[in-house]
Structures are given as structure tokens and as C-alpha cells.
């Protein structure tokens, strides 16, 4: 102890300083969960995106089906006009997966000229000449069977054995078909009724069309085409 200038005694060492350390547990603690408001916002955003995606997908499917229906209508018209202008029988062949040498699961359409039509027809066509190339429907679409009222579906009829190609490279296929005579009328499938074509959303299983059904009633998203027997003019009968 030392005497100060005022004559009082005091300790020569400074008193200890009290230091409060920070609570590291509290400082490093971060919330690990969303608040109720944040969770509600995230759910609302996800629902909006899901709704928009479903609408976009549905719109795309409708547009794709319409585009393939337009292709089918144009090929029917082309086959009819080819029969009239060439004065020959013409076949619009419908090849399902496995009917020709293709590696995907898409339906294809082809136009063939035939010099003469067998009478009686025995289910075989030889020496057909292909006009152009095979045209494929968009993936996810089928041409399906099934009649409607007084309309006959060519996919309900037996397949035709079609021989085509050159002598050096002959080809064959078993296809469903619509056949036109030189006047542009339909002679196959043999019937007095108009022809029905069905373009539907779906897939192929073992080479056969499986239309996709929706809802509890099993509705099929499809486009129906009616083709007259005499004039063979195709047009849509249902959107």
C-alpha cells in the first residue's frame, strides 16, 4: 500500500475489470424453419406454376392433335386427287408400329398407286408404286379403331398385304387402308357407309392403338373425320 498525494492509502494494482463474454450459442443460432407466411407464399407459387403447366400441356396436346388431323385430311385429299388425275386405283395406307421397318412407336401414312384392283379382292396388292414418303403422326397420337353410328372405320377391317418397291429392293407391309377408284370414290373398305377416321391422344402397345382415357367416364381426347363414300371428301365431325 502507498500513500497518495492527499495522504490516503490505495492499492498499487488496478482493480480487476469485469468482462462479459457474448453468448455464442445465441449469436450463432438461426431459424431452421419457414414461418407460416413464407410457407403459404411458397405453396401459392407452386400451385400457380402447376396450373400454368397443366394449361400449357393441354393446349400443346390440342394443337398437336389438330396438326395431325390436318395432315390426315390433306393426305386423304391427295390420294383422292391422285386417283382421279392418274386414272388409277390409289391406296392410303395406315401403318401401325411394326407394320413397316420403323423403329419408333408412331403411326405412319403412305400413298400408293395400283394399276388394277383385284376382283374379287383377296386382301393382297402386288406391284404397288409408292408416291412420296411415309408421313408420321406426332408422337403421343394414334389412329384408332371403332365405328360410330353408320360410319365404318377402316381399322376394323382386315389388313391388306401390300407389295411395293423396286425389283432389286422389294418391300412388303401389312396395313389398314382406304382405297379409291379412278373416279375418286372409296372402294375399300367394302361397304355402303361413309368412312370414319379417329385421331386420338394415346400410345401403341404391341402395334395396336391404346387411346388415352380421361376422367371417371373414360372420355377419349380425339378428333373424328368423316369421309364420304362417293365423293370421298373428308371433314371434321367433332372438335
Image: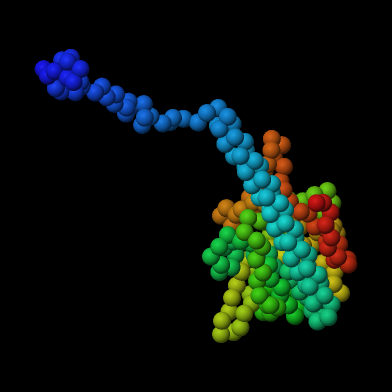
Pick out the residue farthest to the top: 8
> Where is residue 228, by image quadrant?
bottom right
Pick out the residue farthest to the bottom: 168
In percent of width and height, residue 148 lies at: 80, 49
Position of 40 with respect to 26 (left or right) is right
Position of 28 with respect to 183 (left or right) is left
77 w.r.t. 222: above or below: below
218 w.r.t. 88: above or below: above
Tell me which residue sits at (71%, 73%) in the image. Answer: 111
Position of 96 with respect to 76 (left or right) is left
> Where is residue 52, by image quadrant?
top right
In percent of width and height, residue 185 lies at: 85, 69
36 w.r.t. 160: above or below: above
Tell me which residue sits at (84%, 77%) in the image. Answer: 84
Position of 169 with respect to 84 (left or right) is left
Pick the residue in front: 167 or 132.
132
Tell me which residue sits at (11%, 17%) in the image. Answer: 1
Amino acid at each position: 500500500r502507498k500513500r497518495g498525494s492527499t495522504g490516503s492509502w490505495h492499492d498499487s494494482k488496478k482493480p480487476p475489470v469485469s468482462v462479459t463474454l457474448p453468448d455464442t450459442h445465441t449469436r450463432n443460432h438461426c431459424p431452421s424453419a419457414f414461418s407460416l407466411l413464407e410457407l403459404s407464399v411458397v405453396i401459392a407459387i407452386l400451385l400457380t406454376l402447376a396450373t400454368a403447366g397443366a394449361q400449357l400441356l393441354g393446349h400443346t396436346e390440342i394443337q398437336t392433335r389438330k396438326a395431325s388431323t390436318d395432315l390426315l385430311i390433306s393426305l386423304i385429299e391427295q390420294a383422292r386427287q391422285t386417283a382421279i388425275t392418274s386414272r388409277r386405283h390409289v391406296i392410303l395406307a395406315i401403318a401401325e408400329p411394326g407394320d413397316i421397318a420403323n423403329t419408333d412407336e408412331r403411326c405412319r401414312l403412305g400413298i400408293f398407286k395400283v394399276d388394277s384392283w383385284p376382283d374379287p379382292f383377296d386382301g393382297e396388292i402386288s406391284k404397288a408404286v409408292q408416291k412420296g414418303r411415309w408421313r408420321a403422326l406426332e408422337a403421343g397420337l394414334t389412329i384408332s379403331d371403332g365405328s360410330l353410328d353408320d360410319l365404318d372405320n377402316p381399322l376394323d377391317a382386315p389388313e391388306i398385304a401390300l407389295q411395293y418397291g423396286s425389283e432389286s429392293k422389294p418391300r412388303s407391309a401389312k396395313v389398314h387402308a382406304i382405297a379409291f377408284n379412278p373416279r375418286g370414290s372409296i372402294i375399300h373398305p367394302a361397304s355402303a357407309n361413309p368412312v370414319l377416321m379417329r385421331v386420338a391422344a394415346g400410345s401403341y402397345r404391341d402395334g395396336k392403338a391404346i387411346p388415352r382415357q380421361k376422367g371417371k367416364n373414360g372420355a377419349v381426347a380425339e378428333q373424328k373425320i368423316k369421309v364420304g363414300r362417293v365423293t370421298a371428301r373428308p371433314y371434321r365431325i367433332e372438335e
